[in-house]
Amino acid sequence: MTENSSRISKTKIEVGGGSIMIGLIVLGWFIYAGIGRFSDRDRSVVVKGLSEREVVADQVIWPLAYRLAGNDLRSLYTEIERSNTVIMDFLTSNGIPQEEITVSPASVTDMQAERYGYNNEDPFRYKAVSVVTVASDKIDLVRSLMTKQGDLLKKGVVIAGDDYQFQTVFSFNGLNDIKPEMVAEATKNARATAQKFAEDSDSKIGKIRSASQGQFTISDRDQNTPHIKIVRVVTTIEYSLKD
C-alpha cells in the first residue's frame, strides 16, 4: 500500500468515526427528548366538579282520592257522582281551571264475588275508589288548597291522603334552561381543583385529555318540602400536568 493510499484510508476512518459519534449524540438527544415527552404525556390528574341548584317545582299532580262502601250499587254510584261534584266545585271555585281537572272512572269491587279477602262480617258488599286529579303548574295555589281539604270533609267527602297509591307528585321540567350554566359551573369547579393539585405538586395544568358529564339528578330537598328540588350534576375531567 502506498503512503498516499494509507493517508486516505486513515482519513476515511476518522471521518467515519466522527460521524458515528455525532450520530450517537443526536440519537441520545432524541431518546432523552422522547423520554421527556413521554413523561409529560404520562402525567395527569383526574378531578370532579360539582354544581347544585335549588329550584321550585313547576308542575304538580294532585290526586284527590276517596273511598265509599255500600250494599246498593245504584245508591253507591249516586254518592260517587255527588262527591265528584263537590270536589269539582271546590277546585274550580278556588281558581283551578276545569281543563286541569280529570275525573277518573270509579273502581267498584263486589266483595261477594272476590275469591279471597271476603269477610262475612263485613257489612258492605260493594266498595268503591274514585279519584279526581289536578295536573297544574299553579304550585302555590295547589299547595294552599291542600291545606283546605277540611272544607271537603264538612261536605261529606273524606280524602284518602295517607294512601301511598295516591301521593301528590311535584316535578321540575325546566332542566334544559339551567343545564348550560350548571355544566359550566361544574367544569369551573373541576379546573379549580386541578389547579390546586398542580400547585401542590409544583406543576401546571395542561390541556383537557378527557371529560365526561355525569347524569343530572333531581331530588326533593327534604321530605317535608317536596315542592323544593335539588338539581345536581358532577363532571369528571382529566387534565395533563407539565412542569
Image (cartoon, rainbow, N blue to C red):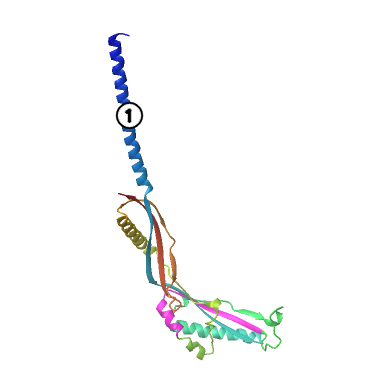
Q: Helix, strand or loop at disc 1?
A: helix
Relative image position of residue 171 (x, y in whole percent): 45, 71
Q: Give the side of residue 81 with respect to residue 205, left or right.
A: right
User: Quadrant location of the N terminus?
Assistant: top left
Q: Is residue 57 visible?
A: no
Q: Residue at left 37%, top 46%?
A: 41
Foreground of the two, 105 or 177 = 177
* Residue 206, above or below 220: above
Three-letter amino acid code at disc 1? Gly
Quadrant of the image occupied by residue 114: bottom right
Quadrant of the image occupied by residue 198: bottom left
Q: Is residue 26 visible?
A: yes
Foreground of the two, 202 or 227 = 202
- Range drawn in magenta: 126-147
Foreground of the two, 71 or 180 = 180
Quadrant of the image occupied by residue 31: top left
Relative image position of residue 233 (x, y in whole percent): 41, 63
Q: How many marks?
A: 1
Q: Give the side of residue 147 with respect to residue 166, left or right.
A: left
* Residue 11, above or below 193: above
User: In this figure, which residue is indicated by the disc labeled 1?
Assistant: 23
Question: Does the magenta-highlighted stretch encompass residue 43?
Answer: no
Label 1 crowd bin: few (<14), some (14–19), many (20+), radius 10 Å: few
Relative image position of residue 109 (x, y in whole percent): 65, 80
**Outermost residue, bottom side:** 154
* Residue 14, above or below 132: above
Question: Does the magenta-highlighted stretch encompass residue 131?
Answer: yes
Relative image position of residue 103 (x, y in whole percent): 54, 77
Q: Give the side of residue 175 with respect to residue 118, left or right.
A: left
Foreground of the two, 85 or 228 = 228
**Outermost residue, top side:** 2
